[in-house]
Image: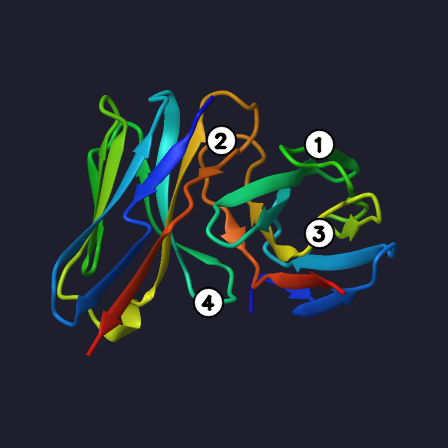
């Protein structure tokens, strides 16, 4: 059974720091891995989607890597800003399921203080 | 504006009542999904629909029911059989029912049982 784990559960950093969020999954048979952002009491916004054949994706100050063989992904945020404060969720799309299934981690709650 | 709308934003239910959460999308997506989110946990799939007039149970379907009479609408009913319904409910949609496309999320409905 596919399980997704995110470490740390919470993180507080001063503005300007570069930081890394971690995601691990137990089964490497996946189509892709996605990183989402969730603001308090709101829905999810997709940040980056990495297909299983890719190693990384970049968008602005965000860079996500995928190491399928070891079951790990990292989300790197450069020069963090208070506006980056949110919960970051990773999700994998497993081969099994027969539909566009996503399995989510519990998220990392990030606070960037001025 | 294209997107997914959910209503109401907040919903209060008395013990023994059924309540229905609305989800509408104007993205012309075939597939739609309902998730439940509890504090400190990832999203868990309740029901999904790959096409109009068809839907399937997800991982935690007990105590919930859905319908898909129109492509753009996928309402969720939380019945009195759901023992612990207090949670944040998220609706999502994707272009294709099977594959690797990202899912687009609505803003969510917070349900509280009084």
Can marks 1 and 2 be said to lie on one chain?
yes
Sequence-first tag of 1 and 2:
1
- Left or right: residue A112 compared with residue A100: left
Q: Which residue is mark 4?
A: A40
Residue at coordinates 57% horizontally, 29% vertically from top-left? A99
- Left or right: residue B52 compared with residue A16: right
Residue closer to the observer: A55 or B42 = B42
* Number of residues whose C-alpha sits closer than 10 Å to that of mark 1, classed few (under 14), some (14–19) or many (20 or more): few
Q: Chain of mark 1?
A: B
Q: Nearer the viewer, mark 3 or mark 1?
A: 3
Q: Nearer the viewer, mark 1 or mark 2?
A: 1
- Percent from the top left, x then y, of residue A33? 35, 37
- Percent from the top left, x then y, of residue A20? 18, 50
Evaluate if marks 2 and 4 touch, with contact meaning CB atoms under 8 Å apart. no
Q: Which residue is mark 1?
A: B56
Q: CA distance from mark 1 to mark 4?
A: 29 Å
Can marks 2 and 3 be said to lie on one chain?
yes
Work out which quarter of the rendered image holds the C terminus of chain B and state it: bottom right
* Number of residues whose C-alpha sits closer than 10 Å to that of mark 2, classed few (under 14), some (14–19) or many (20 or more): some
Q: Which residue is mark 3?
A: B85
Can marks 1 and 4 be said to lie on one chain?
no
> Does the rendering let one see residue B8?
no
Residue at coordinates 51% horizontally, 65% vertically from top-left? A42
Which circle marks residue B99 in the picture?
A: 2
Q: CA distance from mark 2 to mark 4?
A: 29 Å
Q: CA distance from mark 2 to mark 3?
A: 30 Å
Q: CA distance from mark 1 to mark 2?
A: 17 Å
């Amino acid at each position: 059974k596919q399980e997704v784990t995110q470490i740390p559960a919470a993180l507080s950093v001063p503005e300007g720091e570069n930081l890394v969020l971690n995601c691990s999954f137990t089964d490497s048979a996946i189509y892709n891995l996605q990183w989402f952002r969730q603001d308090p009491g709101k829905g999810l916004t997709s940040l980056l989607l990495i297909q299983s054949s890719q190693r990384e994706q970049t968008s602005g100050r965000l860079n996500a890597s995928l190491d399928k063989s070891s079951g790990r992904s990292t989300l790197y945020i450069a020069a963090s800003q208070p506006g980056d404060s949110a919960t970051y969720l990773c999700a994998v799309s497993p081969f099994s399921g027969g539909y566009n299934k996503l399995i989510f981690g519990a998220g990392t709650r990030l606070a960037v203080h001025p | 504006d294209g997107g997914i709308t959910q209503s109401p934003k907040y919903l209060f239910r008395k013990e023994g009542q059924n309540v229905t959460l609305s989800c509408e999308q104007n993205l012309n997506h075939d597939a739609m999904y309902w998730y439940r989110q509890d504090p400190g946990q990832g999203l868990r799939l309740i029901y999904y629909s790959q096409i109009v007039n068809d839907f399937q149970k997800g991982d935690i379907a007990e105590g919930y029911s859905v319908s898909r009479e129109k492509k753009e609408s996928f309402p969720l009913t939380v019945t009195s059989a759901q023992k612990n319904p207090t949670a944040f409910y998220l609706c999502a949609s994707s272009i294709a029912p099977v594959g690797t496309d990202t899912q687009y999320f609505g803003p969510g409905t917070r349900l509280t049982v009084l």
